[in-house]
Image (cartoon, helix red, strand yellow):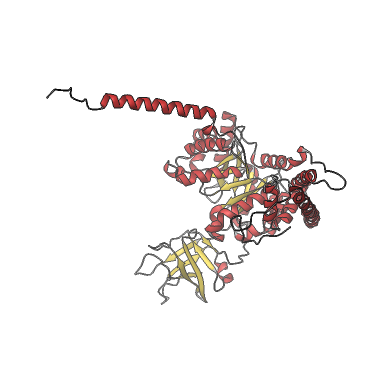
Amino acid sequence: MPTVAPSQSFHTRKIPAISHPVENARTLRIALEKLRREIAREGRETLAVWKSQIHRRSFLPSALNLARYLALRRRDLRELQAQLTALGLSSLGRCEARVMANLDAVIATLSHLAPPPGGPLAHPATSEVFSGDVRLLRHANVVLGAKASHRGVRIMVTLPISAAEEPEWMEKLISSGVDSVRINCAHDTPEDWERMVANVRRAEARTGRGCRILMDLAGPKLRTAEVLKPEDTERLHEGDALLLTRQLQPGLSLSAFQATCTCPELLDRLETGHRVLVDDGRLQSRVEAIFPEGVLLRVFRTRPKGEKLRTEKSLNFPDTAMNLSALTDKDLADIPVIARLADIVGYSFVQDPADLDALADALAAHPRRRPLALVAKIETARAVRNLPELIVRAAGERPFGVMIARGDIAVEIGFGRLAEMQEEILWLCEAAHIPVIWATQVLENFAKNGIPSRAEMTDAAMSERAECVMLNKGPFIIEVVAALDHLLTRMAGHQLKKTPQLRALGTWSAKSQVMTLKNARIDSACAAKWNRRNQPKRPKVGSV
């Protein structure tokens, strides 16, 4: 098949010319059969490398499908898609959960259009075509609990500290449509978590609704610690200097802002040219020089009015191999409590398979009757690159899901690539039949202020592509859950993962059109009547 340059899009390439559909079907069938053989071989080779890490036999078919999907997506298929679309056939654009069955179905259809010497090929069974979707649903139910009957996406809410003290509020929250809750172990105390869990279990019993509990390990906190400002300014602007140091240097003659880092060992790994992003990327800087006192950063982007430098603001190092352990001493102290209370453990700062091994070893000391499910938070560029290996290592060991931590990913890879990257993570997880939690700033303005923006409602609707959407806490969170429940219920009729659902468009139905015309006639008649009543009366002829 002819190939298309990676930079070429539908709008710049030539529309395929098909002068003879049968001959084109024969050419396509031969090309697809060759592609199928290559995908099958590469998939087997990749699975052979992974197989020693997979201890749950139930995950093997999913791992094989993931291996095949990776093999398929290493190729540029755009020209092939265009040729298939011109014949009215599958574009292979929705094959994530069922790579080989999708290829087989298209090849079989082409064989009926242009039969090979042995005659047309048989189509795969319907059960085979949708077996991947069934596995994804089963895995999601194990990790996140059964989905609601009226929508496919579950709703998760981060609990505030008040959830430990107000059992009635917890009942209202679960009654409003919540399917699971998150406890952030970076905040509050084990005693607070105990009370939160007790209130969740009480609310489950009183409402009759199940609710899974995810407890999030805090992980290493990369933040500013102490801050020292020059006397003559309050804000950092483009071109200003910032000294990142192990200890503040009050007597240093350098007229620059100074800050210490909660992980000072990171300073030894920074190199000239590396980016350092502060406060979720609001302040962006680059390493200009390295001194015994610390690392000199030069600011290259802020808002026009500049940025104040404060303590406890996030630090991101997208160009630096940090090699930090994802498990801190605090996490290790929290694991016994989490193993006893939670249904799911959330793992922050996961970057490579060794991080998963460290958590597995820590959990092994606290065995449970039912394995604790694991959700890995994908929040760094390195985690994105290692995602296939992370999936195989984790799902090969226990029930597993992925959380797309969109805030940190956006800072790490750039906001311009966020939409693209969250889609690719969703595709990869669907190929592995792994449930995904869509997180970070979902309906955040609504939760804080009681009024949603148009953009965040559209963003929330896009979460239909995941198995769960996570909301943060806020004073209006119960209203937000009710609104999101309604939104996702409506979207379930229109979208399933990447696949549009062709539900009848009621807005433009025949009945709707008749009612529109009827209403228009009524409106017209009412307007005419109003005009007759209110138009100025003309004087009688001859009157003065």
> Which residue is outermost to the right?
118
Question: Total number of numbered labels?
Answer: 0
Residue 530 screen position, x and y as percent: 31, 26
Depth check: give the residue in front, 89 or 141. Answer: 89
In the rendered image, the vertical position of residue 271 relative to residue 8, given as above or below: below
The answer to which of 12 and 452 lies nearer the viewer is 12
User: For the view shown, which residue lies furthest in the front direction?
Assistant: 542
Quarter that holds the N terminus: bottom right
| Left or right for 240, reference 340 | left
The answer to whether residue 472 shows anywhere in this view is no
* Residue situated in front as seen by the camera: 37 or 433: 37
Q: Please determine whether, in this image, residue 112 is positioned above or below residue 412.
A: above
Left/right placement of residue 45 relative to residue 494 reads right
Residue 13 location (% of width, % of height): 62, 58
Q: Quadrant of residue 53?
A: bottom right
Q: Looking at the rendering, in which quadrant would you find the C terminus?
A: top left
Q: Residue at x 40, y 74 (%)?
A: 255
Would you identify the image quadrant in which residue 200 lies?
top right
Residue 217 coordinates in the image, percent (x, y): 60, 51
Residue 203 position, x and y percent, is 56, 33
Q: Is residue 499 visible?
A: yes
